Image: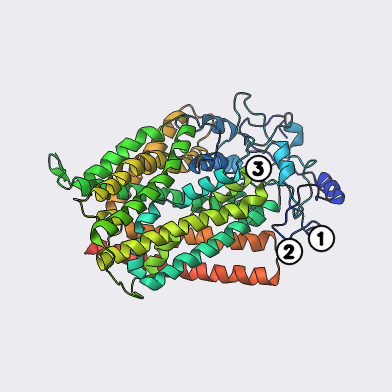
Amino acid sequence: MNNSVSENSFIIESDEEDVEKDSNKGGGDGNDSDSSSYSTENPPQRKPSSYNISWPQSYRQSIDLYSSVPSPSIGFLGTPSLSRLSSSFLSTSLTRRHTPEALPSVTKPLLQEPEDEQHQRRSSHTLLPPLSSRRSSLIKKDSKVSHEVPSRHCSFGQATLNGINVLCGVGILSTPYAAKEGGWFGLSVLFLFAIISFYTGLLLRSCLDSDPELQTYPDIGQAAFGTTGRIAISIVLYVELYACCIEYIILEGDNLSSLFPNARLNLGAFELDSHTLFAVITALAVLPTVWLRDLSILSYISAGGVVASILVVLCLFWVGVDNVGFHSKGTTLNIATFPVAVGLYGYCYSGHAVFPNIYTSMANQNQFPGVLLACFGICTLLYAGAAVMGYTMFGEAILSQFTLNLPQELVATKIAVWTTVHILSLDLFVITFALTISPVAMSLEELIPSNHSKSYLYSFFIRTGLVLSTLVIGLSVPFFGLVMSLIGSLFTMLVSLILPCVCFLKILRSKVTRLQAAVCVTIIIVGVVCSAFGTYSALSEIIKSLRG
């Protein structure tokens, strides 16, 4: 056996004797919490070893930036520091080796919380005993590189704003269109998803509390289904983020082309219409932000999306009161396109990928249910208000974005559209685009061998290729509402409804009551049915639109 270990290999050492000692001591020395019924009085029969630090290692850091939670800065053209810590994906990230004689001095894990925060995480309903004597041995890292999670003390207000910033996005522009597609009865789906998503957010919290080492959604997947679960959940989350970037390109092209419908560009035999032209301009505009070294400043600016969303809804109300009126009665139920509405409403609550990060960043984690309640309550009121106003104003003529229906000659319209174009463009399409695509790029950069001399060049091509691919797909399928419905049906149902219940039942199976099991199974069935019908309907409409 070699006496040296590759500088880029991660090695997890499980000491069963230490685990046994810990189990004898008990694990109820943390802060008590009345938010869950789980305790350590009956320890689980199976004691899992320390969780393997595997791909994606950059998830916590990148998602913290995406959700405006303070996080360390990120390197230019990727994370060279992460590259130094991780070798190629297939050769090291998924391999567990037990070679203690080859290890240098034990160092802290890549994304380890400070010791005082780990002590705080050990609540009275923790399933596992303290892991102080159970060490996860990693390779010796560069002293100049630090990817430890910093001490976080987010207040109730900060956590609530972070949650609203994640939930309240471009989905608000399509809620009137969703009301048209599903009819007034479809609004009940919006409220149903809000209640279910709130509950599944609490389930994620219970999963995190089962082990103080768990910090992110992929960690929960690994605790439930091993490394395969971690990778599968990570891929789903990253594809959802990538699809959202496609939506940003489509939305920017639609809004700018509505302001400048006569814009054209002739390139020899090629002529770019206004929508294509502005989509290309948008992609070129976001490229420099995707290459940025430090995204921490952008994460704070992106919080302005909450203000922009509220302002757009107020402008819609202004137009209705001052000019258009609220005279359309609408339809009670539209069976044919109801699944499309389900996907659109589901998209509105696609924030579960960030909830674990928000929870672990809070100073008082017992306030997390209140944070979720405030986030879902405020966002649901905004969504429902926009849906009712937009549908009663424009009826069956409502478009996929209500800003496209507003009369162009009105002052309120200009404010609404320019808010969407300028504030939301600066925020969601330039800044948030970079924050949204960066987790995907960073995860791909982890697959680059760290000792490769052209790793920076590869990072450049990865990030540029991601942006250009979103442009190509956005131009190929320029249907904002239908693409949003597809994302909501295919990914959001999985991330927000199905996976939290599945992971909860798997991780806490010995502690789950019959009522909890019945509720989780019901939610899983609802999620699967909505996902199947919504995805099929959205794909059918997209194909029909492409052919027609």
Q: How is the image coloured?
A: rainbow
Residue 39 placement (x, y as % from top left): 77, 57
Observer-nearest of 394 and 507: 394
Q: Secondary structure at mark 1?
A: loop
Find the distance from the CA under tag 1 to the CA under tag 2.
9 Å
Picture layout, residue 332 above or below residue 314: below
Find the distance from the CA under tag 3 to the CA under tag 2.
27 Å
Circle 1/circle 2 CB separation < 8 Å: yes
Q: Which residue is mark 2?
A: 511
Q: Is residue 529 left or right of residue 212?
A: left
Name which quarter of the figure residue 42 lies in: bottom right
Residue 467 placement (x, y as % from top left): 36, 41
Picture layout, residue 27 above or below residue 100: below
Q: Which residue is mark 3?
A: 363
**Dot 2 surroundings within 10 Å: few (below 14), some, or many (20 or more)?**
some
The amino acid beneath tag 2 is Lys
**Dot 3 surroundings within 10 Å: few (below 14), some, or many (20 or more)?**
some
The amino acid beneath tag 3 is Ala
The amino acid beneath tag 1 is Asn
Q: Is residue 395 left or right of residue 519?
A: left
Front disc: 1 or 3:
3
In the rendered structure, which disc, 1 or 2, sits on the residue that comes first in sequence?
1
Picture layout, residue 513 above or below residue 22: below
Q: Residue furthest top?
A: 144
Q: Residue at x 30, y 59 (%)?
A: 400
In the rendered structure, which disc, 3 or 2, sits on the residue that comes first in sequence?
3
Observer-nearest of 373 and 87: 373
Q: Residue at x 32, y 44 (%)?
A: 419
Q: Residue at x 71, y 50 (%)?
A: 211
Name which quarter of the figure residue 510 lies in: bottom right
Q: Which residue is mark 1?
A: 42
